Amino acid sequence: MPSVNKVFLIGNLGKDPEVKYTPSGVQIAKFSLATSERVKKGENWEEKTDWHNVVLFARQAEYAKEYLKKGMTVFIDGKISTRTWDDENGVRKYITEIIGNVVKNLSVKRDDGNHDHEASEQENNIPEKDSDPVDDLPF
């Protein structure tokens, strides 16, 4: 039976995208994305925030570098990926990331330089081709 690995997130960037390049020259952008929800604790409501590691490649990474900044609200369409590596001491490390195929800026820059949470004219929803450059990550 086929399986599905699909993620849709709307959240706020926790930092500006960090951009690097693979040895073969593919651009990679990484940033943290915060999603929040209200949960009831006893008689009170509290905000619970989850942080997601987002990775974008090629044109999506270029778009992120050009248009996305800390605090902006974005939509991500992608998949969950967990990778492992051994650190310099031989300890096995794990990281779970969202590999984004589509990113859309949902913030609009106001005259005062801040951002409103409305759809922007700057959108990038062109899916990358079916390659999976995750194995070529430099970090």
Image (cartoon, grey):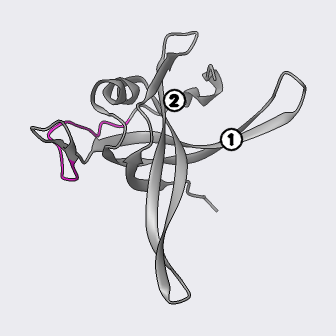
Q: Which residue is mark 1?
A: 95
Residue type of the residue flagged with mark 1:
Ile
In this picture, residue 139 sits left or right of residue 121: right
Residue 107 or residue 71, whichever sits in front? 71
Q: Amino acid at mark 2?
A: Ser
| Mark 2 crowd level (few <14, some 14–19, many ≥20, 10 Å Cα) | few
Quickly name the residue at label 2: 131
Compared with residue 2, is residue 75 higher up or lower down, i.e. above or below? above
| Residue at horizontal 74 percent and vertical 40 percent from the top | 94
In the image, 115: left or right of 100? Answer: left
Bounds of the magenta span?
A: 116-127
Quarter of image, res 23: top right
List x then y, in percent, for residue 73. 31, 48
Instruction: Determine the residue located farthest toward the left in the rendered image.
Output: 111
Which residue is depicted at the point 49% across and 10% down?
25
Q: Is residue 137 above or below residue 50?
A: above
Q: Secondary structure at mark 1?
A: strand
